[in-house]
């Protein structure tokens, strides 16, 4: 698939496995590969910090409080989750779709204001749209229902290896803004400033994601891709194809997986008439 990595080389993701036995379906220079490498960098920083300092945050398996938070992820993050769902039984995938669609109906009925905000067509080059969405999440804070990918029997993530950036870093790391003012992160982490003293800062890593989660036109202009809550992404994907299946192709083609980031940017820029 690529001329820069052979099938027997170590995989770009850092797993130590051979490329052909790991992510051979992903171009090492694609958007998906960049995200996988970033995920590894975040995990390594958190693990390295915990091992060298001995500090361990209150987050532990079995605590799923943050899975009830109202938060958004980018399309490529959701597509990596979809890639993992490919290995599931089709009935289980359908079940998650149904759960997510049901959560959308709940939102529509019980929180029409937040629902309208999700339905609003904002994005493009308007960075203000992102702030609006973040503010909406902050106001809502928690949902009555958990992430549709939470296994509620064991309180564990069903797609742990493919979990989004925020799920990797929330509680186990911090951003520098946390150091300037204090707030309650969750019921187990009452003081964000104190928490910053026992967790590594991952702000630079999180920020580096926006360069490949968004679209850069050949002229260097960034077109921001809107992030959505996980339950809403399932609705988008269902509406796109009418199927409750594991699917991760951008507009039915694997642009984010098979093409290099530059190629993908050019193709998408053309499709949405930016060039
Ligand atoms: Zn790999």
Image (tube, rainbow, N blue to C red):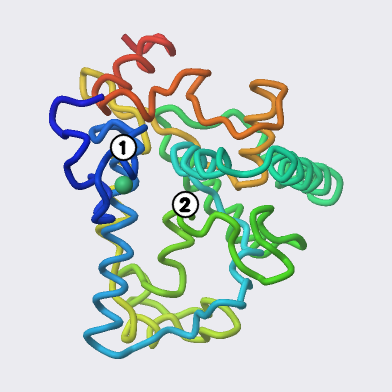
**Is disc 2 surrounded by few (<14), some (14 to 19) or many (20+) residues within 10 Å?**
many
Q: Nearer the viewer, residue 160 or 71?
A: 160
Q: Residue furthest bottom?
A: 54
Q: Secondary structure at mark 1?
A: helix
Marks 2 and 1 sit apart, C-alpha to C-alpha, by 17 Å
**Residue 124's quadrant in the figure?**
top left
Q: Residue at x 73, y 42 (%)?
A: 115
Q: Position of residue 45 (x, y in %)?
A: 26, 69
Query: Does 233 appear above or below 70?
Result: above
* Residue 267, placed above or below residue 70: above
- Relative placement, left or right, of 149 versus 170 is right
Disc 2 to disc 1: CB gap under 8 Å: no
Residue at horizontal 32 percent and vertical 35 percent from the top: 24
36 or 120: nearer the eye? 36
Question: Which x, y percent locates residue 264?
Answer: 32, 22
Residue 25 falls left or right of residue 246: left
Q: Which residue in the structure is indicated by mark 1?
A: 212
Residue 100 in the image: x percent, y percent? 73, 45
Establish if 183 lies above or below 3. Answer: below
Residue at 51 percent of width and 19 percent of height: 251
Label 2 secondary element:
helix
Q: Quadrant of residue 49?
A: bottom left
Residue assigned mark 2: 162
The residue positioned 60% from the left and 34% from the top of the image is 246
Q: Quadrant of the N terminus?
A: top left
Q: Nearer the viewer, residue 151 or 15?
A: 15
């Amino acid at each position: 698939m690529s001329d820069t990595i052979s099938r027997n080389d170590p995989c770009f993701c850092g797993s130590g496995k051979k490329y052909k036995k790991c992510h051979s379906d992903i171009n090492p220079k694609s958007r998906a590969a960049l995200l996988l490498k970033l995920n590894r960098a975040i995990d390594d920083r958190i693990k390295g910090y915990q091992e060298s300092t001995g500090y361990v945050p209150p987050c532990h398996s079995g605590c799923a409080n943050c899975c009830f938070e109202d938060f958004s992820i980018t399309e490529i993050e959701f597509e990596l989750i979809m890639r993992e769902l490919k290995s599931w039984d089709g009935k289980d995938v359908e079940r998650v779709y149904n759960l997510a669609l049901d959560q959308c109906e709940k939102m529509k009925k019980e929180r029409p204001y937040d629902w309208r905000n999700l339905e609003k067509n904002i994005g493009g080059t308007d960075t203000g749209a992102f702030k609006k969405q973040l503010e909406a999440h902050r106001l809502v804070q928690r949902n009555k229902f958990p992430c549709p990918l939470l296994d509620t029997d064991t309180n564990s993530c069903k797609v742990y290896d493919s979990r989004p950036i925020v799920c990797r870093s929330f509680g186990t790391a911090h951003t520098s803004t946390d150091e300037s003012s204090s707030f309650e992160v969750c019921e187990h982490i009452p003081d964000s400033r104190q928490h910053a003293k026992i967790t590594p800062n991952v702000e630079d890593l999180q920020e580096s994601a926006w360069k490949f989660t968004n679209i850069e036109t050949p002229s260097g202009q960034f077109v921001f891709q809107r992030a959505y809550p996980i339950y809403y992404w399932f609705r988008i994907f269902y509406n796109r194809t009418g199927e409750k299946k594991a699917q991760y192709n951008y507009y039915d083609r694997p642009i984010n997986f098979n093409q290099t980031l530059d190629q993908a940017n050019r193709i998408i820029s053309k499709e949405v008439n930016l060039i």
